[in-house]
């Protein structure tokens, strides 16, 4: 069972990582150490982090294609 302080760290870390990703990218610098602190091994933490990045990239590509901001 997850402890209350771990849950707070996850929510706060996710929020801060999201803000960093929106402004400059590299929110993984926060999420990877946080996931490993919670007990995930490095490979699992990285894979978990990549799943979010896939959804973020797919969403960005879809949005940019709809607004015709990218000239192919």
Image (cartoon, rainbow, N blue to C red):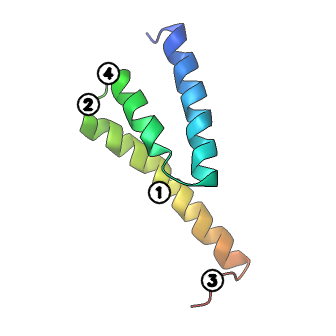
Label 3 Cα crowd, 10 Å radius (few <14 / some 14-19 / many 20+) = few
**Residue at the image point whose x is 38% and y is 32% from the top:** 33
- The answer for how far apart the CA atoms under marks 2 and 1 are is 20 Å
Instruction: Give yes or no for contact between labels 3 and 2 (Cβ–Cβ under 8 Å).
Output: no
Of the image marks 1 and 4, the number of the one nearer the N terminus: 4
Q: Which mark is residue 54?
A: 1
Q: Secondary structure at mark 3?
A: loop
- The answer for how far apart the CA atoms under marks 3 and 2 are is 38 Å
Task: Tell me if residue 63 comes above or below residue 37 in the rendering.
Answer: below
Instruction: Give yes or no for contact between labels 2 and 1 (Cβ–Cβ under 8 Å).
Output: no
Task: Tell me if residue 5 comes above or below residue 11 in the rendering.
Answer: above
Label 1 Cα crowd, 10 Å radius (few <14 / some 14-19 / many 20+) = few
Residue picked out by circle 3:
70
User: Viewer-proximal residue, 58 or 6?
Assistant: 6
Residue picked out by circle 4:
39
Instruction: Give yes or no for contact between labels 3 and 4 (Cβ–Cβ under 8 Å).
Output: no
- The answer for how far apart the CA atoms under marks 4 and 2 are is 6 Å
Q: Secondary structure at mark 1?
A: helix
**Residue at the image point whose x is 57% and y is 50% from the top:** 21
Residue picked out by circle 2:
41
Of the image marks 3 and 4, the number of the one nearer the N terminus: 4
Pick the quarter of the image with the C terminus. Answer: bottom right
**Residue at the image point whose x is 64% and y is 43% from the top:** 19
């Amino acid at each position: 069972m997850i402890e209350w302080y771990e849950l707070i760290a996850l929510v706060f870390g996710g929020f801060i990582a999201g803000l960093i990703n929106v402004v400059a990218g590299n929110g993984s610098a926060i999420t990877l150490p946080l996931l490993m602190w919670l007990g995930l091994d490095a490979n699992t933490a990285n894979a978990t982090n990549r799943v979010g990045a896939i959804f973020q990239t797919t969403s960005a590509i879809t949005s940019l294609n709809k607004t015709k901001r990218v000239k192919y």
